[in-house]
Every structure is written in C-alpha cells, then in structure tokens.
Image (cartoon, rainbow, N blue to C red):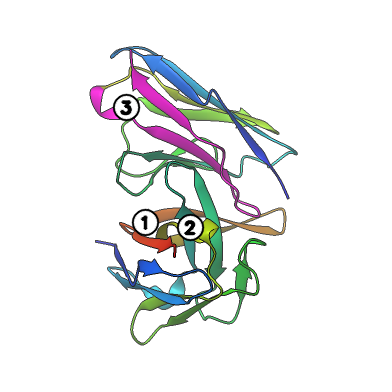
Amino acid sequence: DIQMTQSPSSLSASVGDRVTITCRASQGISNSLAWYQQKPGKAPKLLLYAASRLESGVPSRFSGSGSGTDYTLTISSLQPEDFATYYCQQYYSTPFGGGTKVEIK
Amino acid sequence: EVQLVESGGGLVQPGGSLRLSCAASGFTFSSYAMSWVRQAPGKGLEWVSAISGSGGSTYYADSVKGRFTISRDNSKNTLYLQMNSLRAEDTAVYYCAKDEVVVVAATPGRYFDYWGQGTLVTVSS
C-alpha cells in the first residue's frame, strides 16, 4: 500500500500568514491527491482534488501543487475560519495522511 | 443539494454487532460508489469500506475485513455498514461519504466529495 507522510503535524500561525503543508507519498501517485479541511466536531470538507484543482466554492487562497511523490497545500493569507486540521489523501488504497493542525499563534 | 445522514451508532459491548445506515439525497444514488470512513477519538481519518454504485463490488480495509459488511439499497437511497465482532479499537465516529472514482493510467482510485455528519460507535463493556 502507498503510505502518506504529512508534515508538520501541527503549526501555529497568525491571520494573514502564508501557510504551507506538505504530503509525501511512499511512491509516485501521478497527482492523484486530495486535500480536506476538518473543523472540531465536523465532517471533513473537500478542498482540492487532482493535487491542484479547487473544489467548487472553496476560496482561491487555497492552492495545491506538486508531482510524483511530493505535494503541498498552501493557504496564501490565513483567515480566522481557516484554523482547522488538514488531511491529504491519495486515491489508491485510500489512506490519509496523519493530519496537520493549524492553530492560532 | 447533496445530503448524507448517518444513523445507528451507539454503545455496544466487545464482540457485539451494530448496523449503521446512511440516507442519501440530492444526487442519483445508484450512479455513485460510496464509502465509510472512520475517525477514532482524537485521531486521524481511516477509510473503512467502499461499494460500487450497483453494489456488485465491495472493498474493505484489512482492519475490518471479515467482520464488517458494506451494502446498499438503491431503491431506498441508503447505504449500510454491518459491523460484527466489534472491538474496542473500532470505537470511532463513522462517516459515510460519496465517492468520486477516478481512473489514472488504468488504475482506479477514489476521493470523497461529500460527507455525512457522522455517527459515534463506542465499543466498551
């Protein structure tokens, strides 16, 4: 199975900061990667798929990039509503990364 | 508007059984694969099981294979998860999710574009 290593596991940031989260696959996954946002007590929400395609309704400050085994989620200017936990997920055998909790500095 | 509403969670003793349901609306249910994803308290997400739109193909994580059975009733727009031989480590919030199945280089994969609100399963004596 393809394993996903997500980093960092947590970070502290301020409103307006640029935030980058990384996901590394144990083998190449051909951009077959999704990113989700989860707030406490809520279900995950799809943000991006195919590594860089923004889901309908998701703000443009979220973007994704990468290729092969290494992928990133970037929030260009962190907003108060963006404090949450983020997960990557590769499409095959569907394991998720361990998550990154974005907290207020 | 796509809606997924889970039910059937609760407290069950180790070794017991429980059946979860997920009522779907707002899309053509029979045209889409569906999955169950769980989250243990304070932990990350774990895919559990998936089923094709017709119900003819099913898939399971190794951690539940042989104990859990996924099924669907397309006439009722409802997804199910029958959980037997439950263990303490099955304690989690269980989410149903609508799959987007993608084929890349002849290899099928999936991601999840809609999720239910979840139902809590607690396995404890």
Residue bearing mark 3: A83
- Residues marked 1 and 2 touching at CB (< 8 Å): yes
Residue bearing mark 2: B37
**Could you tell me if residue B96 is visible in this image?**
no
Side of B16 relative to B74 (left or right): right
Residue B58 coordinates in the image, percent (x, y): 60, 74
Label located before the other in sequence (1 or 2): 2
Residue A16 coordinates in the image, percent (x, y): 30, 12
Measure the alpha-carbon separation of dots 2 and 3.
22 Å
On screen, residue A92 above or below A39: below
Q: Few, some or many C-alpha atoms within 10 Å of disc 1 (few <14, some 14-19, many ≥20)?
A: many
- Residues marked 2 and 3 touching at CB (< 8 Å): no
Label 3: element kind: loop
Q: Are discs 2 and 3 both within one chain? A: no
On screen, residue B101 above or below B74: above
Q: Which amino acid does label 3 sit on?
A: Phe
Comparing A68 with A2, the one in front is: A2
Which stretch did the figure color magenta?
A80-105
Residue bearing mark 1: B115
Residue B124 coordinates in the image, percent (x, y): 44, 62
Measure the alpha-carbon separation of dots 1 and 3.
20 Å
Residue shown at the point (40%, 83%) measured from the top left:
B74
**Could you tell me if residue B40 is visible in this image?**
yes
Q: Are discs 1 and 3 both within one chain? A: no
On screen, residue B71 above or below A12: below
Q: Which mark is residue B14?
A: none
- Residues marked 1 and 3 touching at CB (< 8 Å): no
Label 2: element kind: strand
Quarter-of-image position of residue B3: bottom left
Residue shown at the point (58%, 82%) measured from the top left:
B56
Q: Few, some or many C-alpha atoms within 10 Å of disc 2 (few <14, some 14-19, many ≥20)?
A: many
Residue A87 coordinates in the image, percent (x, y): 48, 38
